[in-house]
Amino acid sequence: MTTAAKEAEMMKVSRELFTDGIPLSADVFTRLPSGQYLCIGRKGDASNLATLHMVAEKKADLFVRKDDYPHVVAFNLNLIGKTVKNENISPQVKVSLIRGVTDSAISDLTERGIFVGSYEKCRQITGFIQDTTNQIQDFNKFLETFNKLPGDLVTHSLATTVISMLICEQMNITMKATLEKVAMGALLHDIGMKEIPRALLEKPRMEWTEDEVLYYESHTLRGVEILRDMKEIPADVLAIVLEHHENALGLGFPRRLRDIKTNPLARIVAVADCFVDLMYDPRREGEQRTPEEAIHFIEFGMGQPFNKPAFIALKQLLHITNLQKKIASNG
């Protein structure tokens, strides 16, 4: 297989996805200066990546096959779930697993052509999401709930969180308390999906019956009910979970609210959620769009039904991405 073909198959991931002594959930590779990929860990083998000099010294990036990535995410969330009730394992260790998945979500967005920012900016976003989740008093219950989402939905939620943060940056939203609510709401926006049958989620939407559509749309209400038991979840976060499928035209669900009646933070997550869905939805295999195609489809295929300032901020993010590409190509 050629190096170019390999490149298309690989995805850069965080070192924190692999815990020493725990069996690897997929083959792990590093990229040589020649561009070729070298397997440094086989699926099922106990991880000892940290003992490798090039990994320990942070001189090498790690990769897995793109097809394996959802399984790696699911494996790590399952690992989190197993540590939740273990009082001997500190919350910091549990949060570091979330950080590893978040790092990889940022890496995936970068691979898809989204300019997330400098390395320091990426670390800042990752740290912010980590700090936000760590503030939840009933952290173990949060992890148990989040752990019940399938791996691909976790990837979607994390990518939606990162895009929501970047939209906030373009909208000059800087208040920490507000950003924390956006991050938490975006992270949890699809939590109600855990009660939707997997068979329905994998079924093409054009084949859904009217009852199946209504059942799917109930995930917003189900999400709010799940989170009501966590007393420290702010009302704005519950509003994001409830309203992330509403739109400015009043054609969304569950309440068909127009823009002026929806929560301002939910408007941001709504456009980020749709944008990420167009790029990631596994049901659109063969139709997954590039960032440019996703923007074009929202604007012209859907008639741009979202909050205008939030959508303009998303377009500005893509404009910055294209500028960075031009700068890089010009050396």
Image (cartoon, grey):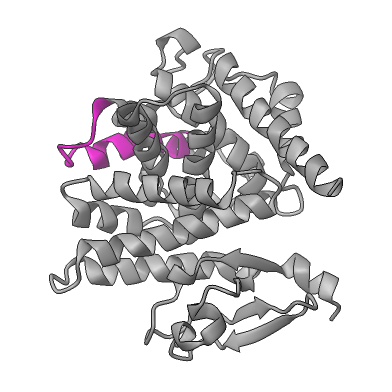
In the drawing, does residue 177 fall left or right of residue 16?
left
Q: Could you tell me residue 149's position as x and y percent? A: 40, 55
Instruction: Give the residue drawn at x 58%, y 82%.
Output: 27
Q: Is residue 70 magenta?
A: no
* 10 is higher (above) or lower (below) than 298: below
Task: Find the magenta span and give its range.
Answer: 214-235
Instruction: Give the residue drawn at x 59%, y 47%.
Output: 118
Magenta-colored segment: predominant secondary structure: helix
Q: Could you tell me residue 133's position as x and y percent? A: 30, 48
Instruction: Give the residue drawn at x 47%, y 52%.
Output: 123
Q: Could you tell me residue 197's position as x and y percent? A: 43, 53
Q: Is residue 231 magenta?
A: yes
**Image quadrant containing the N terminus:** bottom right
Is residue 243 shown to the viewer in this render? yes
Instruction: Give the residue drawn at x 65%, y 43%.
Output: 115
Q: Residue furthest bottom?
A: 45
* 279 is higher (above) or lower (below) than 311: below
Is residue 190 shown to the viewer in this render? no
* 5 is higher (above) or lower (below) than 183: below
In the drawing, does residue 93 fall left or right of residue 71?
left
Residue in front for this viewpoint, 222 or 97 = 97
Residue in front for this viewpoint, 190 or 315 = 315
Residue in front for this viewpoint, 25 or 254 = 25
* 121 is higher (above) or lower (below) than 143: above
In the drawing, does residue 286 fall left or right of residue 102?
right
Circle count: 0
Q: Residue furthest top?
A: 260
Residue in front for this viewpoint, 79 or 202 = 79
Q: Could you tell me residue 150's position as x and y percent? A: 45, 58
